[in-house]
Amino acid sequence: VLVNVLGKNPNTTFVLIDEVEQENWGIGGMTTTEWRAKQK
């Protein structure tokens, strides 16, 4: 995507994956844990 859409040079493009704990991620002002509980 970075190469095809943004025209980035693949030789100088790096991807970093940083996993975030579920409690530290939010949707609509709620943690994902709270949001998922409301979806049930």
Image (spheres, rainbow, N blue to C red):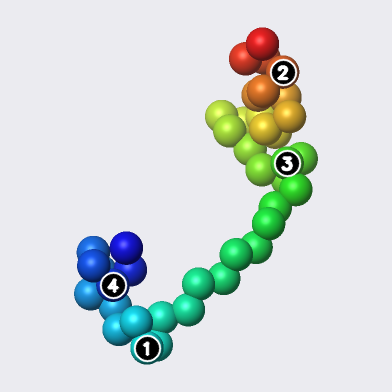
* Residue placed under numbered mark 3 in the picture: 22
Local packing at callout 1 (Cα closer than 10 Å; few below 14, some 14-19, many 20+) is: few
Q: Quadrant of the N terminus?
A: bottom left
Quadrant of the rendered image containing residue 22: top right
Query: Residue sitting at 37 percent across and 88 percent down?
Result: 11
The label nearer to you, 3 versus 4, is: 4
Query: Label 2 vs label 4: CA separation?
Result: 38 Å
Mark 3: which secondary structure? Answer: helix
Query: Label 4 vs label 1: CA separation?
Result: 10 Å
Which mark is on residue 11?
1
Name the foreground residue: 39 vs 3.
3
Kindly identify the amino acid type of the residue bearing the numbered disc 2. Answer: Ala
Query: Between disc 3 and disc 1, whose residue precedes?
Result: 1
Query: Residue sitting at 63 percent across and 38 percent down?
Result: 26
Name the foreground residue: 1 vs 32.
1
Query: Between disc 3 and disc 4, whose residue precedes?
Result: 4
Vertical position of residue 4 compared to residue 32: above or below: below
Give the residue furthest to the top: 40
Mark 4: which secondary structure? Answer: loop
Kindly identify the amino acid type of the residue bearing the numbered disc 1. Answer: Asn
Q: Disc count in the image?
A: 4
Local packing at callout 4 (Cα closer than 10 Å; few below 14, some 14-19, many 20+) is: few
Query: Label 3 vs label 2: CA separation?
Result: 13 Å
Mark 2: which secondary structure? Answer: helix
Query: Label 3 vs label 4: CA separation?
Result: 30 Å
Query: Residue sitting at 57 percent across and 71 percent down?
Result: 16
* Residue placed under numbered mark 2 in the picture: 37
Give the residue furthest to the bottom: 11
Query: Residue sitting at 73 percent across and 29 percent down?
Result: 33
Vertical position of residue 32 compared to residue 15: above or below: above
